[in-house]
Amino acid sequence: MTVPTPQRILLVDDEPDVLDFLGYNLRLEGYQVETATNGLDALRIAQRFKPHLVILDVMMPGMDGIETCERLRSIKEFENVMIAFLTARGEDYSQVAGFKAGADDYIAKPVKPKVLIIRIQALLKRVKEEPPQQVRPTITVGDVEIDPDRYQVRIGDHLWQLPRKEFELLHLLVSRPDKVFSREEIYRAVWGDEVVVGDRTIDVHIRKLREKIGESRIGTLKGVGYRFVSDQKE
């Protein structure tokens, strides 16, 4: 019988006590854990360790968690790795900045071990359940072309390589042009039922998409949800 390889988690925090506490509890659950106390070490270790999940503290000296996340996302092999922020800061700054940087989730300090484990299991379940090398067809609506294999969006002569969650959200909307997707439908399709995210998560990602592809391409039905607008006017 083949023993499954433990999933790998990289913990990044400038407080050794936090690393020891979280690392101890994660290893008890059978995860393979490595730690770093700053962003530069995290980038170096990630190249060797190949984590399935990176948990980043936001407030670190030198390169903070936001910049570390952005740097990880700029490396092709880490475009789709799960990244969660661990921070004691308020939602208004940390969640918005974290999701802009490409994070998948946000975990507030102080966190109880059982809560942390549940959140991590939910994130890593999505990694295990993703079909390897699944081919999804390119979608074309008007002058918009969505390439799921490359996480690319082309509109006319402009080409964007989007962060994972921004792309999945846009892909969902474009898959059924002009259909209004409720916030609940979007949460389930993009983040999954078992991942708990803040109320502003969708709004942040919609705003980032509008900044890139244009305000008029994503419509809002107040109190209901969002749609991709296919009837663009010249």
Image (cartoon, helix red, strand yellow):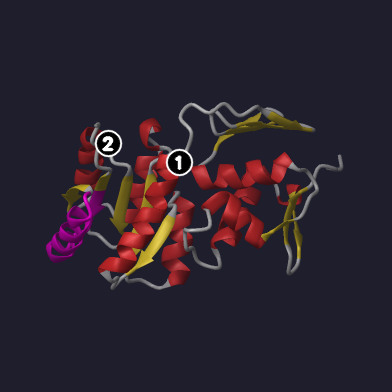
> Left or right: 97 with respect to 51?
right
Q: Which mark is residue 195?
A: none
Report if residue 211 is visible in the image.
Answer: yes
Residue visible at 15% across and 59% down in the picture: 24
The main secondary structure of the magenta stretch is helix
Nearer the camera: disc 1 or disc 2: 1
Which quadrant holds residue 109?
bottom left
Q: Position of residue 93 (x, y in %)?
A: 44, 67
Quadrant (top left/top right/bottom left/bottom right) for the C terminus: top right
Can you identify the residue that label 1 sits on?
129
Report if residue 207 is visible in the image.
Answer: no
Can you identify the residue that label 2 sits on?
50
In the rendered image of this protein, does residue 56 appear above or below residue 17? above
Front-lying residue, 134 or 214: 134
Residue type pointed to by label 2: Lys
Marks 1 and 2, how far apart at CA: 18 Å
- Secondary structure under tag 1 reads helix
Quick one: label 1, few (<14), some, or many (20+) residues within 10 Å?
few
Q: Position of residue 139 (x, y in %)?
A: 70, 31
